Image (spheres, rainbow, N blue to C red):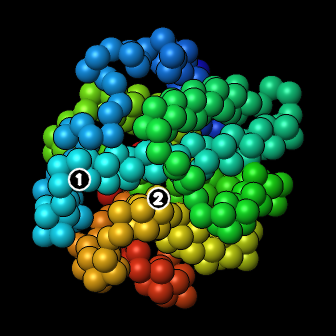
Amino acid sequence: MTPAPNTTADRESDQTVAEKRAYEAVIERLSKASVDKHWEPYADIPWDDEDFLVRQDDPRWELPGVDKLGGHAWYRAQTPETRARIGLWRVATAMKIGLQFENLLKRGLLNYAYRLPNGSPEFRYVYHETIEEGHHGMMFQEFVNRTKFPINGMPGPLSLLAQITPWIPLISTELFFIFVLGGEDPIDHVQRKTLKEGQIRHPLEETIMRIHIAEEARHISFARHYLRRRVPRMPRHRRFALGIVSPVVLGIMARIMLSPPGSMIKRFRIPEHVVREVYTDNPETAQQIRDSVGKTRELCAELGMMNPVQRRVWKAMGIWAAPTGKAVR
């Protein structure tokens, strides 16, 4: 039997060991899950089945009425073929931006793993995640190719600026994993809500979405557990700076992931007043963006990165809501 700790230092040491073991157990569990349950995009998706084929005028691509644009009078007044093409363009753009984000993420993960010491429990899981993100990229690009649309994804200037992202782990791994959550949490939030409400009508989109949600759940869990372990150990001034930068990253990322693509607006000549009514000046759209970063906002509060100064930044970025205190996993 292990003797009880006799001093405060002993108790703190035992707590540190217990926390480390719990953290490593989580990583081991995530690594095992990646082996036990994973998908191959060209083996597990029946791309050429008749029901899975991508046709630009397929009415199953039409935006549902609950969608902000799908419910607008301008959209409902378009021909069925145009409504289908707008819906497909939007889905394809989301996938293209998703694969571009995951390209940056993979390069950042490999830069992070490059410096890990022998025996590091994170090494194996980071490689599992990198492989899974590679599969997601192939899955998304295959979908985009089959639409036959000239989908570019991120605007050129933003894509160029984003190239600094893979180098963030060389400066701050904590900031890098905030970036990871900034790209993954909003999409995860929207995809889960969309599936729950039964808004997906095309089986190919649903299959891709379900695969993505299942594997991203592990990636999100790893990022959160990593931050829970690292952030409390950061020097106070660095934790303060991270609390200032985090809402800026999260606010920008959520808008990139959820905003309508400019190429779609231009291609289908969506009037400016429709864009304002549906996206820019719509309180429901603003609420969706706030909700999409809700879990990461709760995590930042849990980690002590929500003082009055930092809250002002959250409010300035339009993503503030009072934390509920619920545990976030």
Say whether residue 160 is visible.
Answer: yes
Residue located 60% across and 64% down the image: 155
Amino acid at circle 1: Arg
In the picture, measured across the screen, residue 307 lies left or right of residue 168, that is: left
On the image, the x and y values in percent for residue 311 come to: 48, 82
Position above or below: 282 against 65? below
Position above or below: 161 against 108? below
The disc placed on residue 39 is none
Residue located 52% across and 83% down the image: 313
Q: Earlier in the sequence, mark 1 or mark 2?
A: 1
Which quarter of the figure has residue 290?
bottom left
Position above or below: 141 against 8? above
Q: Nearer the viewer, mark 1 or mark 2?
A: 1
In the picture, measured across the screen, residue 238 lies left or right of residue 201, that is: right
Question: How far apart are the alpha carbons under marks 1 and 2?
Answer: 21 Å
Position above or below: 46 against 221? above
Closer to the camera, 177 or 202? Answer: 202
On the image, the x and y values in percent for residue 73 come to: 13, 69
Mark 1 near mark 2, Cβ–Cβ under 8 Å? no
Closer to the camera, 5 or 43? Answer: 43
Q: What residue did someone put label 1 on?
A: 83
Closer to the camera, 217 or 276? Answer: 276
Quarter occupied by the N terminus? top right
On the image, the x and y values in percent for residue 128 come to: 63, 26
On the image, the x and y values in percent for residue 284 come to: 23, 73
Residue located 63% across and 53% down the image: 177
Residue located 36% across and 69% down the image: 269
Classify 10 Å Cα crowding around label 1: few (below 14), some (14-19), many (20 and above).
Answer: many
Q: What residue did someone put label 2 on?
A: 257
Say whether residue 15 is visible.
Answer: no
Quarter occupied by the C terminus? top left
